[in-house]
Structures are given as C-alpha cells and as structure tokens.
Amino acid sequence: MLTGAPGAGKTTLLDAASGAGLRTSPEVARELLQRPGGMELRESDPLGFAEAMLDAHRREFERHGSAQDSGQGEANPVLFDRGFPDVVGFLEVSGLPVSPAIDRVCRELRYLGPVLRAPAWAEIYRQDAERIQNWEEAIASDEAVTAAWRRYGYDPIDLPFAPVDERLRFLRDLL
C-alpha cells in the first residue's frame, strides 16, 4: 500500500514496482480526474468525488481479492496506490464530514501488509493537470491522509527521500 503526499513519487514507485514484476493497482483519484467531468466533479461536488473514489477503491480491492495469497500458500501482494483511508483524509482536508458508510468501509475492508508513506518532498513536487494542490495544500493533504491511516489502525512507514531504485529496494525488503 502506498499513501502520502501528492507529488511525492508514489506513481513513479508504482511504475517501477510493476516493471519489476510486482502486482499493482493504480491511483483511482487520478483516473477519475482524467475522465470527462472528473475535475469538475472534484471542484463542484467534493463529497460526490469522495464517494466515486471510495467506489473505485472498493472495485480495485475486490478485483484483487485478498491480494495476499496466490492460492499456493505463497505471498502474492498487490501494491495499491492509495486506499480507503485516503478518502477520509481527502474529506477532512476539504472540511467535509466522513459519512458512517465511508467509516464502516475503512474499518471492515482491511489492507494487509505494510503501508508505505511517501512524505512531502519539495525537491520533486510539481503541479500538473490533476495535481492542483499548491505546496502548502500538499503538506496538509499528507498530514490528513497519514492521520486517517493511523486512526484506522495502520502504522505507515516512511519511504526514504531517495531515487526510485532505492525506494523499490526498500519496498521489496519490506515485502
């Protein structure tokens, strides 16, 4: 599981992990934002956007099953780019309440394995068409999602500020 600040290298690490043969699941928020009307939904109806993210995360979670067992007794993890508690962080940083339904999903559908946090990293942060947060907002987002993961009983492990190959080695050592 990858979480953390926007623009902190999660997608780059996910791409490297996929290239190294690990199973991965993309960031659903970015996919939603790239669809027609996605950015408008985020801006005009952040609660609706959060619900769309939750539904997309649930589909990915269900698509990968337990994401922990290949059926042959061997670990077969999936590296998810963000997860259910990230939706809570998005809502909280947006000043919106967390619905009982979203809270229930975070409590009942559990990710196994380490949760890796990509902390805010000024040297690599860049805004783009979907990453619209300024630096201060990126830090606030990181704080909110990290707090949400902890609230739901996870203990995020910080990725090192290092090139992607070192981050990938760090990830593989934890798996």
Image: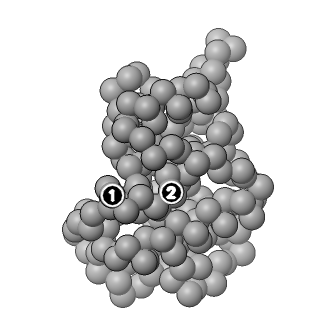
Instruction: Tell me if I can see residue 73 in this picture.
Output: yes
What count of labels does the image hold? 2
Q: In the figure, is residue 123 to the left or right of 45?
A: left
Q: Count residues near mark 2 (Cα–Cα under 10 Å), then give few for <14, some for 14-19, many for 20+.
A: many
The residue under label 2 is 119
Which residue ends up furthest to the top in the rendered image?
A: 72
Q: Count residues near mark 1 (Cα–Cα under 10 Å), then give few for <14, some for 14-19, many for 20+.
A: few
Q: Position of residue 62 (x, y in %)?
A: 57, 43
Amino acid at dot 2: Pro
Residue at 40% from the left image edge and 22% from the top image edge:
21
Amino acid at dot 1: Glu
The residue under label 1 is 123
Residue at 54% from the left image edge and 79% from the top image edge:
93
Q: Position of residue 118 (x, y in %)?
A: 49, 52
Q: Is mark 1 in CB contact (under 8 Å) with mark 2?
A: no
| Residue 35 disc label | none
- Front residue of 128/32: it is 128
Question: Is label 1 or label 2 in front?
Answer: 1
Q: Quadrant of the C terminus?
A: top right
Q: In the figure, is residue 44 to the left or right of 107?
A: left
Position of 148 relative to 70 (above/below)? below
Q: In the figure, is residue 32 to the left or right of 110?
A: left
Position of 159 relative to 129 (above/below)? above
- Front residue of 141/26: it is 141
Q: Position of residue 23 (x, y in %)?
A: 46, 30
Helix, strand or loop at label 2? It is loop
Q: Quadrant of the N terminus?
A: top right
